[in-house]
Image (tube, helix red, strand yellow):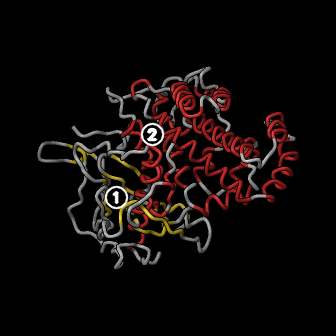
Amino acid sequence: MTNPEQIEQEEPGTRFLLYPQSPFLEPDAPLELVEISAPQGSIGPGPSGPRMYTVNPVGKSTPYGAIVPGPGGPGMYLPPWDGYIQPPAMPDEFGNFIHIDPTDPAFEAAHLFGSAHFTMDVWQGYFDRPIPWHFARDFDRLELSLLPSLDNAHIGWGFLETGGTHEHGNEYRPYSLNFDVVAHEIGHAIVYSVIGMPTDGDAGGEYYGFHESAADLVALLASLHFGSVIDALLENTRGNLYTFNRLSRFAELSDNAQIRIAANDRPLSDFAAGWSSEHDLSEPLTGAMFDVFVDIYHERLLVHGLITAEEEDLSDQLEGSPDYSRVMQGIFDKRYAENPEGFRIALLEARDFLGSYLADAWEMLDADMLSYFGVEKALLAVDQEVTGGAFRRIIEGNFRMRDIGLTTAGPRLPDPNEDSHSNSVRTQVPD
């Protein structure tokens, strides 16, 4: 199991300032300093590096992936952008990008690049290897493109394009400044690279549901590499993540979009008759994985002596009951106050157990035969190899609670949602 924070670098990485949470959630949202793996001096104007580059096009109105006329007939509109661009974000004298003020138009490009690169660094740490782009046959680098007219963010064949939303009055809120959104799209790229695309261009619903779940988990675990996110999470819950997850109150205490998505109680049996949105279909798998994460965190608290075996048993006995919060919150308040740093260490350990487990399990999956039950079996195989089966009960129990292994998703229903990935630029491959 590899911890990304323990990877030694021979020279300092390039530094960026990122918003761990959307800056539109609170006034004067704080920025956090991060260091990506690219050595200082290796990232040029744009920003631009060996794996990805950012452009802010002038006059671009058509999003990538659209079908447009061409000399050989209609085809996909793909990078690179060869028109005029806005002035690029420039590195400072040391090769960093921490000098750019958030009011500077170039900050959006720097934030998009830093978020994408940081997410990929985290997950290459969990995989313990470089993750090639799934579009490598045609492009060496990912183009990160800003397109304000696009009310979406999507990744496709050689591009990650971000727009923004005007749904909050007349204020434009660019998705490039939302770390969760960018990390989610990088998550899709990781899945395509590691697991692949269906050979016949289509797959069962659980493949598409898995894609959304995996992308959410990529974003969730990447966000948990910000110290401020960890600190806020523990301070808001006093370390009692399990309570708020089980009682569906976790969302009230967290501004992190991916955590809100993960804390759900949806069973797979809700989709036995069919599905129309893979985002909804992803919820049983994401919810099961979040429960596994919280339960592993509980086990780490016990290992470190931060809670007693009797307290853990009491938690298991009260799980799902209306008395859980009333009884357990007082215990966690007391225990957390005794050793906040111990709780933080346990949470980081649970985070990295889950990240490395997911990476190893995803390596075992195949796009043409993917199922939620298959994900469970892969996780159990990883757990057996790593710990001798220490978390077997946790994995099996949480997957059964979501009816995974007891039923499967039904067929795709007519008229899928307009934001469905099963027929979008994310899944289109040029001839």
Q: 217 or 389: nearer the eye?
A: 389
179 displayed left or right of 92: right
Q: Is residue 308 visible?
A: yes
Image coordinates for residue 131, horizontal then vertical, percent? 36, 45
Answer above or below: position of 224 versus 212: below
Image coordinates for residue 368, horizontal then vertical, percent? 39, 25
Answer above or below: position of 425 versus 335: above
Q: Quadrant of the C terminus?
A: top left
Q: Amino acid at mark 1?
A: Leu
Residue at figure coordinates x 53%, y 27% from the top left: 381
Q: Which circle's residue, 2 or 1, is located before the other in the chain?
A: 1
Image coordinates for residue 96, horizontal then vertical, percent? 39, 72
> What SS does tag 1 mark?
strand
Residue at figure coordinates x 79%, y 39% from the top left: 312
Q: 98 or 145: nearer the eye?
A: 98
Residue under label 2, please give it.
420
Q: How many numbered marks have been drawn onto this rendered protein structure?
A: 2
221 displayed left or right of 115: right
Mark 2 burial class by Cα count in 10 Å: few <14, some 14-19, many 20+: some
Q: Amino acid at mark 2?
A: Ser
Residue under label 1, please give it.
144
Residue at figure coordinates x 43%, y 69% from the top left: 15
120 displayed left or right of 334: left
> What SS does tag 2 mark?
loop
Name the quadrant containing residue 284: top right
Could you give the CA–CA distance between mark 2 and mark 1, rounded to whole angstroms?
A: 22 Å
Image coordinates for residue 100, horizontal then vertical, percent? 42, 77
